[in-house]
Image (cartoon, rainbow, N blue to C red):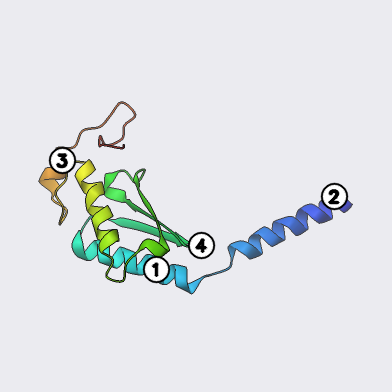
Amino acid sequence: MVKEFFTIRIKMQEIERANTFNVHDYSTAKNVAEHLEKKYPGWLWAVHAQDGIVTVKSMMLSGNWGFVMHEDKIDNDYHSVVRAGGEILERYNQSRGKFKQDDYQELTMDRKGQLSGDRT
């Protein structure tokens, strides 16, 4: 009985922690996504910000690869974010700029079924 009580209490604490919402993290993710979409439209940028860490991926490039940046390293005009987003595109031999279906169709898949790109 005591063990069940502690298990339920721990699970409730985890749920309560998961329900917290940080407006600063939300606005950081929103701003990063907006700057990337403005510079590189159509690449479906997925941005997550939490506890000072910003993670960015392009869902058009399989969504498995992207970049991680400390929030305090992001400059006011988001040039560091835009530069990193462009580097991701170049690793997949895509031009920096708007999504182009013709260039995208030239990408090949590796043996794991993922888009081939430079992941180093």
Where on the picture, by quarter, is residue 70? bottom left
Residue 99 appears in view: yes
Circle 4: residue type: Asp
Q: Residue at x 65, y 65 (%)?
A: 16
Q: Mark 3 to mark 2: distance in Å?
A: 56 Å
Circle 2: residue type: Lys
| Disc on res. 105 | 3
Q: Mark 4 to mark 3: distance in Å?
A: 37 Å
The secondary structure type at the circle numbered 3 is helix
**Residue 68 screen position, x and y as percent:** 39, 52
Mark nearer the N terminus (1 vs 2): 2
Residue 1 appears in view: no
Figure quadrant of the C terminus = top left
Q: Residues within 10 Å of mark 1 (few under 14, many from 20)?
A: many
Q: Residue at x 32, y 67 (%)?
A: 75
Q: Mark 1 to mark 3: distance in Å?
A: 32 Å
Mark nearer the N terminus (1 vs 4): 1
Q: Mark 1 to mark 2: distance in Å?
A: 41 Å
Q: How many marks?
A: 4
Mark nearer the N terminus (1 vs 3): 1
Q: Which residue is mark 2?
A: 3
Mark nearer the N terminus (4 vs 2): 2
| Disc on res. 28 | 1
The secondary structure type at the circle numbered 1 is helix
Circle 1: residue type: Thr
Q: Residues within 10 Å of mark 4 (few under 14, many from 20)?
A: few
**Residue 104 screen position, x and y as percent:** 16, 44
The reply to whether dot 1 and dot 4 touch (C-beta < 8 Å) is: no
The secondary structure type at the circle numbered 4 is loop
Mark whose residue sits in front, 4 or 2: 4
Q: Which residue is mark 4?
A: 51
